[in-house]
Image (cartoon, rainbow, N blue to C red):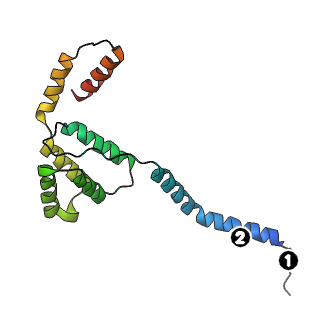
Amino acid sequence: MRAQLATTITPEEIVRLVGAGIAVVREPERLANEARIYTSCLKIENPEKFDRKSPTAFNQWWESVTMYLGFYPETNSGQKIAWVGTLLLDMALVWHLHRYRELRDNDTWVNYSTAIRAEYRNEREVADVQLKLGQLCYQGSICTYLTEFRALNLFA
């Protein structure tokens, strides 16, 4: 004959055990939802458009692009490439579309970012910034002077 266990489980204990089991199963889902909530609540504006003709220096524009993408780390390689394409105008957009037609889904973010920097890097930009740095003058506000000096020094 089998020995019977004389343990009684109350309805409250059953509810507690089932609830604990559900919580364990749903924990990864809860963490994923929390991450989505925090990311989706914060929005930043896109960098300005780049057309190669504008006075915007490519290096500064590209820095704003990489900062923006750092804010949205879940973005995949194809999405990054397509998004940068939306920021390009005129001949820069023609360059982007030509590259897309040639490579389609075989392009990677590493290769794309290397190619666009090689294509649009302004060799004179550093020299121009160094010239501006040499011409920088104090004009009544040490705070303004130091801010301009630091900004120019970063690019020089």
The residue labelled by disc 2 is: 18
Q: Which mark is residue 5?
A: 1
Crowd around label 2: few <14 · some 14–19 · many ≥20 (10 Å): few
Q: Residue furthest front?
A: 140
Q: Position of residue 41 (x, y in %)?
A: 48, 51
Name which of mark 1 and mark 2 comes first in the sequence.
1
Mark 2 is on which residue type?
Answer: Val
Q: Residue at x 31, y 12 (%)?
A: 140
Pointers 1 and 2 in contact (C-beta within 8 Å): no
Q: Residue at x 28, y 26 (%)?
A: 151
125, above or below 28, in the image:
above
Could you say which quadrant of the image residue 54 lies in? top left
Q: Which of the pair 155/89 is nearer the observer?
A: 89
Q: How many marks?
A: 2
Q: Residue furthest bottom?
A: 1
Mark 1 is on which residue type?
Answer: Leu
Horizontal side of 16 relative to 147 (left or right) equals right
Task: Provide the secondary structure element on which disc 2 rests.
Answer: helix
49, above or below 15, in the image:
above
